[in-house]
Amino acid sequence: MVLYLARRLSASALILVGVTIVTFCLTFLIPADPVAMIAGRNSTPEMREQIRIQLGLDKPLVEQYVSYAQRLARGDFGTSYARKSEVGPLIASRLPATLLLMLGAIIAELLIGIPAGLYAASRRGETGDKVAMTLSFLTVSTPQFVLGLSLLYFFAYLLGWFPLSGYGSLSHLILPAVTLGLAGGGWYSRMMRSSMIEILRQDYIRTARAKGMSERRVMLVHALRNAILPVVAMIGLDVGIFMSGVVVVENVFGWPGIGQLMWQAIQSLDIPVIMGVTTVAALFIVAGNLLADLVAPLIDPRIRLR
Amino acid sequence: MFSFWKRFSKDKVALFGLAVIAIVVLAALLAPVIAPYDPSEQFFDGLTLEGSPLPPNERFWFGTDTNGRDQLSRLLYGARTSLLIGLVANGIAVLIGTLVGVVAGYARGFLGAAIMRFTDLMMAFPPLLLAIALAAILKPGLMIVIVVIALVNWVQIARVIYTETTSLAEREYIEAARALGASGPRILFRHLIPHLVPTIIVYATLGIATTVLLEAMLSFLGRGVQPPTPAWGMMIFESQSYFLNAPWLVFVPGAAILIVALAFNLAGDGLRDALDPTQRGRR
Amino acid sequence: MRAFLISTAAAFALLAAAPHVLAQSPKQGGAAVVTFNNDLTTLDPQVGYDWQNWSVIKSIFDGLMDYKPGTTELEPDLAESYTVSDDGLTYTFKLRDGIKFHNGRAMTPADVKYSVERAVNPATQSPGGGYFSAIEGYDALAGGKANELSGIRIIDDKTISFTLTRPDATFLHLMAINFAYVVPKEEVEKAGADWGKKPVGTGGFKFVEWVPGQRIVLERHKDYYRSGVPYLDKLTFEFGQDPTVAILRLKNGEIDIVGDGIPPAQFTEIMADPANKDLIAEGDQLHTGYVTMNVTMPPFDNLKIRQAVNMAINKERITRLINNRGVPANQPLPPAMPGYNTDNKGYPYDPDGARKLLAEAGQPEITTELYAMNVDPNPRIAQAIQQDLAAVGIKAEIRSLAQAEVIAAGGAGKAPMIWSGGMAWIADFPDPANFYYGILGCAGAVEGGWNWAKYCNKELDARAENADAMVKADQSEKRIGEWKSVFDEVTKDAPWAPVFNEKRFTYHSARLGGDPSLFTDPIHIPVNYDYIFAKDAQ
């Protein structure tokens, strides 16, 4: 176990280095010139050249990366081109909001997905099953903007149950978390239903039923334990999906997270911000994946960590 | 094969799904014949005097879009792009994801770990940035969309399949097969993959909808199908801020995506039941 | 003899305006909330250069000059008066008494000098430094060979003079743009990299807090030199919200101004609602939306083809596409700009004529690319242009991309055509010169420059410089006439196809009062926050 963990952690560190290298190269593949953005409309070629030198953009790519990596290792994310302020504190000020939103969304999707999947599996082929599964398709196929705007219009604007936007209390969190969670909940309910059905036909379930165990007990104790595995595997993955998906929800609900920061940075090619957000997001995604692998054997003892 | 079709054809729900798919594919192929207008024509009177899109009416059955184009014609032509993307791009992603996940989950030791760490690397990466950069090297177009979507989407599938495979691989019947001297590929294809079919079907069918929407995102970033070529995802994406004021703009292509995804799901469920020997005689 | 140049017309206008202000005499007090979709990048006046931070900076800082609220009329601000030498090369400003920074310190001429030098100093990376190139010593400071501008001299503790290397008729305007706004050196140095996040100025509003991604709070500057203004006690900017939702919040009474404007989706409904009659202010912008054609590459190196494009575009329909929030354009300058030529009708919409021109040019079939920024409504407008071009035989493939990429393609001269929407020129100051050098002159037609048509007409450049050398008050009419003829020539040469001049519609809550021109201020885009007032404080 300790050995496994050590191996995984060192692999994770390598992955992070890999992510920074690839991202760094990718930002140079994008056909846009950050200096033209910074220098503005009235600049002369000499001014642009000066800025290029100041930012170190005149040096070869490898040299630029090495100096970036050295600063990164000291925890220095560099200075934003557009904001002229440090990227580290910028991300730090936005990260808690995104993490809170993701936590809320994970809770929401589990609360929506697992019961819905269980219900559908237990009513397999009946109307309840069909309704639940059609709904799951609906939530997965609806664009987040439309879903979020509908929820907001109905529950916050017309009914006034929730604030229209903002950040700071539980009531602010519920609508954005549910918006994100509904799509994930749709996936979870489908996964849950399929794996429940798969497991309910295993021999040991038949044995349990034959022994006269109540259907409820069969479902909740024996089947759920096994069926939940693919769902757990997905929670770790959600981190990655949310990291790239939060921007729309953040924008609808005025949630001050990292997604908006990234979006603005991509539009204006603010490379230090793009690099910083990607690195921090990668850190969480890698951690999420590791967590998923560590939790799996706890739920299904047949899995051994290797 | 014959017995498979016999079982499948008894499944009325699955047949219904198949019929819907056939109709949609036919509509896409016959779009030039059945579409009432040119999908790119921006009618001068396709907008109100204030520049708003027209709601469904006698002339434009599904209304007009924000450029004053006929929604119905765009829907029919858009089916071509969107079906191709939803089926081919998503299909490739599912295929790669399944193979990578199964191999990594079944192979022990270094190979499995190496594959999964590579998967982690791919996942830790912002897909939008990947798409932008990839398309910077290659010229935008349908091919690029398919490649980018496949490259972005296989990762999640691989991860889920991997976790399930690690669990399956430890089960008694796999041990038994191995003890009986079955070869690796045989175990993979005969004993592992069939048990993964339910998960694969979920991804293959739900993925159709999300893929079509991802295509819209690529178009927005200038890396997808370029205007005025219609695509369902783009039709939604362009007009989603109109949702409260001109809901038909979102409902029409949204319903189309939903119907196709549901039809594939019904057919997929039937396919699974027909393929699965343990299901014979039961429903 | 020195000409005393504080324009008498302006003084009369001030007097005329005064009773009007007194008649209303709004009381101070109350608060307003403004929303923007994008988080502000910075409040550093020497750096901020997008339309969200532009007007916020104007409320926190002041320059030597400013404009009368809601108009494009220049008037002294931190300067009490100024004189211009006969040769037009020296401007001497006498500073007003009792100007205090928000930190309590009195402003001095040294602060003015420091601030302009800060804009030019390459270490600041200011996008506006180039505006001050006429000041003596510019090349040395911009080139990193000096630490100050030798042309700026502090005469005494109330007087400062600027010596120029060439006459520049726009110089007073330059003293009114954000890049010349006065900042206190000690605060800039104390804050270091955080200066853009904790600004200290002399303006009507004092910075209170900035919660990243959420809000910026300003409060009334009690020691502001203009008594009675600003009217609002508190001004809050909230960020990160889609304008569609911001409109709902305004209807709910939670916010007062949707800074991004009314989204196209809701425009018709909001305009049709009689309850909104007094809540929507409509005003002209110093803005032109245009298509650039790269004159250095085929097919647009051919004048006839450029003219054909001008005749092919149906501007009426495109104006309808943007909910009639604009008027079809016929020349590069917007109608509200001095130098706009009412006799210049531009090119008529004439597809047949366009086809004829293409045939004359020997290229009835053309394939090209049209770049556009990917934010609504620009892809839609690009598609409308695409259809119009296709109708005359020009097949344009649309490249709808992020802003940074379009700018890069334009600067590198790789884009045959660019629809300027979302990146178009909104004048920094109301003078025709501001619509020429960077975007139509030779100076901008270089690698990385903003003249995307790469149009470089040396003769016009010379005439433009000649016009800007006319600095005397009695020459101003002649100067504007000269600029008129420059833009008439540009229209004939057709490096651009002007499409429309945008109008601004600002939707505000019933709680706010003030002349509609304040809510669509052509200088303080979008709103002049200093002069609007809260009705509930009256």
Image (cartoon, coloured by chain):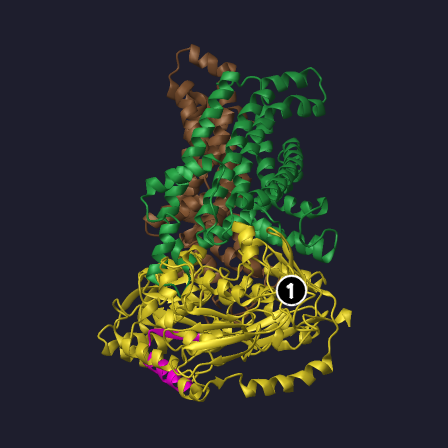
Chain colours: A green, B brown, C yellow
The answer to whether C319 appears left or right of A58 in the picture is right
Nearer to the camera, A122 or C528: C528
State whether residue C92 appears in this view. yes
Residue at left 21%, top 75%? C362
Q: Quadrant of residue A173?
A: top right
Figure check: A85 above or below B32 = above
Chain hosting mark 1: C
Tell me the quarter of the picture where residue C228 sits: bottom right
- In the image, residue B283 above or below residue A112: above
Please provide percent x and percent y for residue A237. Answer: 53, 34
Towards the viewer: A218 or C471: C471
Of residues B10 and C161, which is closer to you in this image? C161
Percent x, y of residue C157: 55, 69
How many numbered marks does the figure carry?
1
**Residue A31 in sight here:** no
- Secondary element type, mark 1: strand
Residue furthest out toward the top: B179
Specify the quadrant of the image occupied by residue A108: top right
Percent x, y for residue B56? 56, 66
Furthest-front residue in this view: C156
Q: Nearer the viewer, residue B124 or A85?
A: A85
Residue drawn where x is 36% and y is 69% of the image: C292
Q: In this view, which residue lies farthest toward the left?
A: C362
- Residue C483 colored in magenta in the image: yes
In the image, taking residue C287 as reference, residue A147 lies left or right, namely right
Q: Main secondary structure of the magenta part?
A: helix
Q: Percent position (x, y) of residue C68?
A: 58, 78
| Magenta region, residue range | C480-499
Q: Which residue is mark 1?
A: C205
